[in-house]
Amino acid sequence: MKVEERTKECNEALGKLVGKKIVDIKFKPYNGDCWRLYITTDKGRMVMSFCRDWTCPEVEHREVE
């Protein structure tokens, strides 16, 4: 995937936070060179995984159960 496409994908994933109330954030190391950021909003949870050599974080959305 080209850098421009990946950047657009990252912006769209982060854009899903707009208009939501962030109620909690947790940061945890993962695998030595990677980290996870758990963002809890009033509408659900976003998990962002970052690694040193990645262009952009991997984003997973989880809805409120």
Image (cartoon, rainbow, N blue to C red):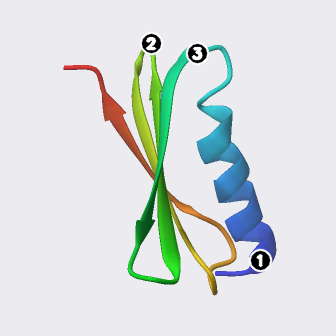
Residue plotted at (77% across, 77% down):
3
Give the structural element (helix, strand or loop) at label 1.
helix
Q: CA distance from mark 3 to mark 1?
A: 28 Å
Give the structural element (helix, strand or loop) at label 2.
loop
Q: Quadrant of residue 5?
A: bottom right
Give the structural element (helix, strand or loop) at label 3.
loop
- In the image, what residue type sits under mark 2? Asp
- Of badges 2 and 1, the one in the foreground is 2
Quadrant of the image containing the C terminus: top left
Viewer-side residue, 23 vs 44? 23
Q: CA distance from mark 3 to mark 2?
A: 6 Å
Characterize the local packing of mark 3: few (<14), some (14-19) or many (20 or more) Cα atoms within 10 angstroms.
Answer: few
Of labels 2 and 1, earlier in sequence is: 1
Q: Which mark is residue 48?
A: none
Where residue 47 sits: x, y (%)? 43, 47
Q: Is residue 46 above or below residue 10?
A: above
The residue pinned by badge 1 equals 3
The residue pinned by badge 3 equals 20
- In the image, what residue type sits under mark 3? Lys
Q: Is residue 51 above or below residue 65?
A: below
- Of badges 3 and 1, the one in the foreground is 3
Q: Is residue 1 above or below residue 13?
A: below
- In the image, what residue type sits under mark 1? Val
Q: Are the two marked residues, 3 and 2, in contact with CB atoms closer than 8 angstroms?
A: yes
The residue pinned by badge 2 equals 42
Residue 51 located left or right of residue 8:
left
Quadrant of the image containing the N terminus: bottom right
Residue plotted at (58% across, 64% down):
57
Residue 22 located left or right of residue 62:
right
Of labels 3 and 1, earlier in sequence is: 1
